[in-house]
Amino acid sequence: GKYVDAQNALNAVLKYEPNSAQAHFWLAAIYGEQGNMMSRKQALGEAVRADRNFIRARLELARMLTASKAASSALTLLNETPEMQMTPELLVQDAVLNMSARDFSGARVSVEEILTKFPEETRALDMVVRIAQAEKRPDAALRTIREHLQAHPKSASLQQYLGNYLLSTGAFVE
């Protein structure tokens, strides 16, 4: 009942405003609740086409593409994001997609951008560790974490991250 009514109302909006990114986005949410993933993906695509700056729709579509094993399409979608809109979330997603494509240098570029623009974003340090593990260079992870911490010595969250990393790896015994 409620979904059908909402879907009908949104379709009425789209009849008069076919480029309403919000209407396409909420229609995608309804399709998702109904389990209609093909229509959800199409509606999210329409939302992004209607408003290329609609980051939430872009990110949801990228997640769907990643889940459906279309990592290269998700990466393309994220790379089309306007530069001013590159949030830590999108940059982390970009790094993860590059990692899944085994493009470690591409993942490092995203991680470096995160650490430059958002220095206290510890998810970037998690990606540093994952890249180093994938490349079988755990020493590189610790070196990068320490260098980053030296550049930001007053950051409690980075200090805590280093402490947790050292405890989890046993590297505190030097």
Image: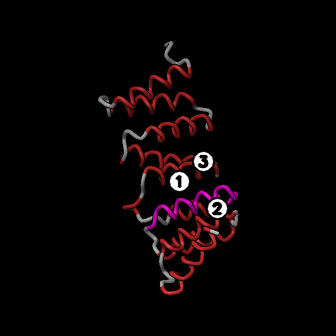
What x and y, as percent, mark residue 134? 63, 38
Specify the amino acid type for callout 1.
Asp
| Residue at the spot of label 2 | 33
| Residue at the spot of label 1 | 94
For image coordinates 54% across by 68% down, the residue present is 26
Q: Residue furthest left?
A: 154
**Residue toward you, 9 or 164:** 9
For image coordinates 64% across by 63% down, the residue present is 32
Q: CA distance from mark 1 to mark 3?
A: 9 Å
What x and y, as percent, mark residue 159? 39, 26
| Residue at the spot of label 3 | 99
Residue 39 in which image quadrant? bottom right
Colour logic: secondary structure
Of badges 2 and 1, nearer the viewer stands: 2
N-terminal of the pair, mark 2 or mark 1, is: 2
Q: CA distance from mark 2 to mark 1?
A: 26 Å
Side (left or right) of 96 relative to 163: right
Q: CA distance from mark 3 to mark 2?
A: 30 Å
N-terminal of the pair, mark 1 or mark 3, is: 1
Specify the amino acid type for callout 2.
Glu
Is the residue marked by circle 3 packed among few (<14), some (14-19), or many (20+) residues within 10 Å? many
When the figure is inspected, residue 118 is found, relative to residue 53, above or below; the finding is: above
The magenta stretch spans which residues? 54-72
Side (left or right) of 90 relative to 62: left
N-terminal of the pair, mark 3 or mark 2, is: 2
**Element on which disc 2 rests:** helix
The answer to whether marks 2 and 1 mark residues whose Cβ atoms lie closer than 8 Å is no
What x and y, as percent, mark residue 102? 64, 48
**Element on which disc 3 rests:** helix
Residue 8 in which image quadrant? bottom right
What x and y, as percent, mark residue 98? 58, 51
Of badges 3 and 2, nearer the viewer stands: 2
